[in-house]
Image (cartoon, rainbow, N blue to C red):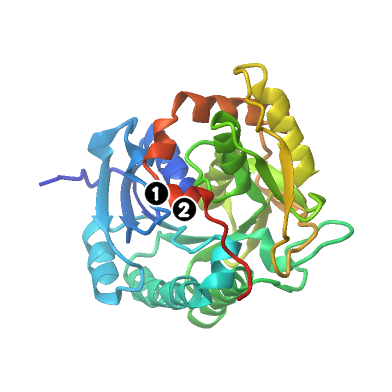
C-alpha cells in the first residue's frame, strides 16, 4: 500500500505512458509532486518511457481509460489531486484517416466523461485545476501569419476535428458549469520517448537502421517545432499561474519544412555515426488532406506568464538524436510494424 502525505501536492496525468505525458511526469517528479498516471495502455503507451523515474516513491500507475466514468470518479476522490493534466488522446493524423472512430471515442467521448467527473470533483475541492492539452492543428492550414487564441478553428483531419471538439467541450463546461479549466494548444513536439510513427523519431530510426527517409509529397509541409521539455515547462507554468477559462498557445516561433528537418538530421547524424548508403530522402505519396503549414502566435503566454522556450532547434535536435542513439532499445520496445508500415491512405 502506498501512503501519500496529506501535504504533498498531488497531480493526475492522463495518458502518462505516451510521449508528452511521460516527459511531463518526469519533470513533475523532479519538482517534488506526487504523480498518479492514468493510462489505458494502447499501442502508443510504453512502459519504457518511465523506466528510470527520478522519484519512484512519489509515483503511482493505474490502468484506466478516461472513458471509464466510475473508475475515474473513484480515483479523483481517492487521490484528491490539485491538478489534472489531460493528455489522454489519439494523436496520429494518419491513424485518424484509417480509424476515425477511435479518435471520436477517446478525444471527444473520453474528454466528456472526464469533464463530468471533474465537474463533480471541483465542487467539493475548490483549489483544483484541469489543464486540457490540445494542438495547433485545430486552427487548420495557416499559409500566412500565425494563429492566435481567438482565431477560428478550421480542422482538416479527423484527429484535428476531434481535438477541436474536445477543446470546445472544455470551454463550454467552464462557461456553463464554472469548472476551473484551461486549454493549451501546442505546436509540433520533438524529443525523447516519441513514438516513431511521428516524423523525427521515424527519420532517426531509419538513419540508424540504414533505411531510406520517407517524406510526404515534396517535403514542403512546414511545422513549428518545440522541444517537449519546453512544452512541459509551459504546462506547469499554466497550472501554477494561468487564468481559468483561458486558452494558451505554446510554441517556439520556429518553423521548418519536412525536407529541411530530414536534411538537418542527416547532418547531425554524421557527427556521431557513419551513415549507410541507403540513407537518402525518398518522396512518397502524400497524406490525404495534408495541411501545408501550422504556425501559432504564443505571445500571450510569453507576455502574461513570463514563459519562453529554452531550447533552440539546433541544440534540441542534437540532444534528441543522441537520446535515440543511446537508447536504441526504445525502438525494440515498440511493435516493428507500427514503425515501418505506411498507414493513412484513403481506401
Residue 139 image-quadrant placement:
bottom right
Q: Residue at x 50, y 73 (%)?
A: 99
Quadrant showing the C terminus: bottom right
Q: Residue at x 50, y 48 (%)?
A: 339
Disc 1 target residue: 335
Is 52 located above or below residue 98 in the figure?
above
Q: Which residue is located at x 33 percent, y 57 percent?
A: 41
The secondary structure type at the circle numbered 1 is loop
Residue neighbourhood size for the residue with mark 2, other residues' Cα within 10 Å, grouped as few (<14), some (14–19), many (≥20): some
Q: Position of residue 261 (x, y in %)?
A: 73, 39
The outermost residue toward the right is: 144
Q: Are marks 1 and 2 in contact (CB under 8 Å)?
A: yes
Q: Would you identify the image quadrant in which residue 83 lies?
A: bottom left
Residue 338 tag number: 2
Q: Position of residue 1 (x, y in %)?
A: 10, 47
Asked whether residue 238 is in view, the answer is yes
Q: Is residue 319 left or right of residue 19?
A: right
Return the residue nearer the eye: 253 or 214.
214
Relative to residue 32, is residue 163 depicted above or below? Answer: below
Residue 102 at x, y = what percent?
A: 46, 73
Q: Nearer the viewer, residue 341 or 59?
A: 341
* Image-based side of 58 in relation to 22, left or right: left
Out of 198 and 125, give the one closest to the viewer: 198
Q: Is residue 3 above or below residue 312?
A: below
Using the rendered image of the protein, determine whether residue 254 is visible from the camera's viewpoint.
no
Q: Note whether 129 is above or below 278 in the view shown.
A: below
Image side of residue 23 versus residue 148, left or right: left
Q: Residues within 10 Å of mark 1 (few under 14, many from 20)?
A: few
Q: How many marks?
A: 2
Amino acid at each position: 500500500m502506498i501512503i501519500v502525505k496529506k501535504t504533498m501536492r498531488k497531480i493526475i496525468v492522463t495518458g502518462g505512458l505516451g510521449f508528452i505525458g511521460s516527459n511531463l511526469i518526469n519533470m513533475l517528479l523532479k519538482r517534488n509532486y506526487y504523480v498518479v498516471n492514468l493510462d489505458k495502455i494502447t499501442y502508443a503507451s510504453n512502459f519504457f518511457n518511465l523506466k528510470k523515474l527520478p522519484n519512484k516513491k512519489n509515483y503511482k500507475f493505474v490502468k484506466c481509460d478516461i472513458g471509464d466514468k466510475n473508475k475515474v470518479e473513484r480515483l479523483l476522490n481517492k487521490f484528491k489531486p490539485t491538478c489534472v493534466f489531460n493528455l489522454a488522446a489519439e494523436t496520429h493524423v494518419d491513424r485518424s484517416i484509417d480509424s476515425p472512430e477511435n479518435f471520436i471515442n477517446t478525444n471527444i467521448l473520453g474528454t466528456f466523461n472526464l469533464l463530468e467527473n471533474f465537474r463533480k470533483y471541483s465542487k467539493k475541492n475548490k483549489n483544483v485545476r484541469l489543464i486540457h492539452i490540445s494542438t495547433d492543428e485545430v486552427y487548420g492550414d495557416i499559409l500566412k501569419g500565425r494563429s492566435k487564441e481567438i482565431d477560428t478553428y478550421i480542422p482538416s483531419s479527423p484527429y484535428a476535428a476531434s481535438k477541436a471538439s474536445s477543446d470546445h467541450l472544455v470551454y463550454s463546461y467552464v462557461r456553463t458549469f464554472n469548472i476551473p479549466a484551461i486549454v493549451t494548444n501546442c505546436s509540433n513536439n520533438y524529443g525523447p520517448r516519441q513514438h516513431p510513427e511521428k516524423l523525427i523519431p521515424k527519420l532517426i530510426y531509419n538513419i540508424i537502421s540504414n533505411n531510406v527517409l520517407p517524406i510526404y509529397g515534396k517535403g514542403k509541409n512546414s511545422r513549428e517545432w518545440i522541444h517537449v521539455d519546453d512544452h512541459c515547462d509551459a504546462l506547469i507554468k499554466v497550472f501554477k499561474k494561468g487564468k481559468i477559462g483561458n486558452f494558451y498557445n505554446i510554441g517556439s516561433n520556429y518553423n521548418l519544412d519536412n525536407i529541411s528537418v530530414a536534411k538537418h538530421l542527416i547532418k547531425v547524424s554524421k557527427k556521431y555515426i557513419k551513415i549507410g548508403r541507403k540513407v537518402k530522402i525518398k518522396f512518397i505519396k502524400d497524406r490525404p488532406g495534408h495541411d501545408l503549414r501550422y504556425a501559432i502566435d504564443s505571445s500571450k503566454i510569453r507576455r502574461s506568464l513570463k514563459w519562453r522556450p529554452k531550447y533552440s532547434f539546433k541544440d534540441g535536435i542534437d540532444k534528441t538524436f543522441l537520446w535515440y542513439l543511446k537508447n536504441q532499445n526504445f525502438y525494440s520496445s515498440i511493435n516493428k510494424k507500427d514503425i515501418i508500415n505506411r498507414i493513412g491512405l484513403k481506401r
